[in-house]
Image: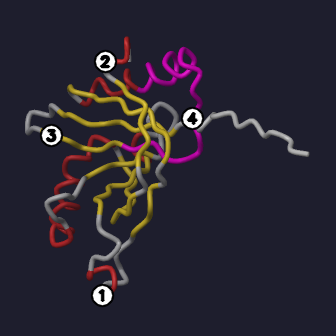
Amino acid sequence: MENGRESTVEKLDSFLVVYERKKGNYHDLPEQWCKFIKKYEHLSSEGTSYMESTIDAPSITDEERCMYELCQTISPDHPALKEDSGILTHTFEGGKYAVYHYKGFPQFLFMVYQEVFCRWLSKTGNQLDNRPIFDIYRNIREDGYMEIDICFPLKDTRIVFLRKTH
């Protein structure tokens, strides 16, 4: 995140997703993604985004027991949401996010998280809030190369001064 070349601070809108929560090793993600995309392809459109929300860090949790959510955006007005009550949805709350624009291979993602948590936050004075961290997939190649936006939720620390009126 040196010199702001790889990250931006942005205000993101809220969005609705269809999701499945998974438990297991992050190395199984490619296979899990194939199954997820196939299962929900009837809900996708030209503007559909795919994302993942990691719940557990493999540095803390047994890597075979890590929880994560696979998600795809969907319009709240999509007819399938009225027809199929078995579809799980939730809304990612909008607001202020640090967006790290990552281009590379998955084995280096751990270093990105370390950079954000150990250096960038303290250097910039930003603080994480309790919304989930999520990755928006922009481009994934078969050789594993990926372009993703890693979205870290930030507290909105604007100071509001109230003026007393008489």
Q: Where's the C terminus, which quadrant?
A: top right
Q: Amino acid at mark 3?
A: Ile
Q: Earlier in the sequence, mark 3 or mark 4?
A: 4
Q: Amino acid at mark 2?
A: Arg
Q: Which residue is mark 3?
A: 140
Q: Earlier in the sequence, mark 2 or mark 1?
A: 2
Q: Is residue 32 magenta?
A: no
Q: Which residue is mark 1?
A: 83
User: Residue 122 occupies which quadrant of the picture?
Assistant: top right
In the image, residue 1 sits, relative to residue 128, either above or below, namely above
- The image position of residue 118, as x and y in percent, is 52, 18
Real-space CA distance between mark 3 and mark 4, rounded to the nearest whole angstrom: 27 Å
Instruction: Check if mark 3's residue and mark 4's residue have beta carbons within 8 Å.
Output: no
Q: Amino acid at mark 1?
A: Glu
- The image position of residue 102, as x and y in percent, is 27, 28
Camera-near label (3 vs 2) is 2
Label 4 sits on a secondary structure element that is: loop
Label 3 sits on a secondary structure element that is: strand
Q: Residue at x 86, y 41 (%)?
A: 164
Real-space CA distance between mark 4 and mark 1, rounded to the nearest whole angstrom: 37 Å
Q: Which residue is mark 4?
A: 128
Per the rendered image, the range of residues in magenta is: 113-134
Q: Which residue is mark 2?
A: 5
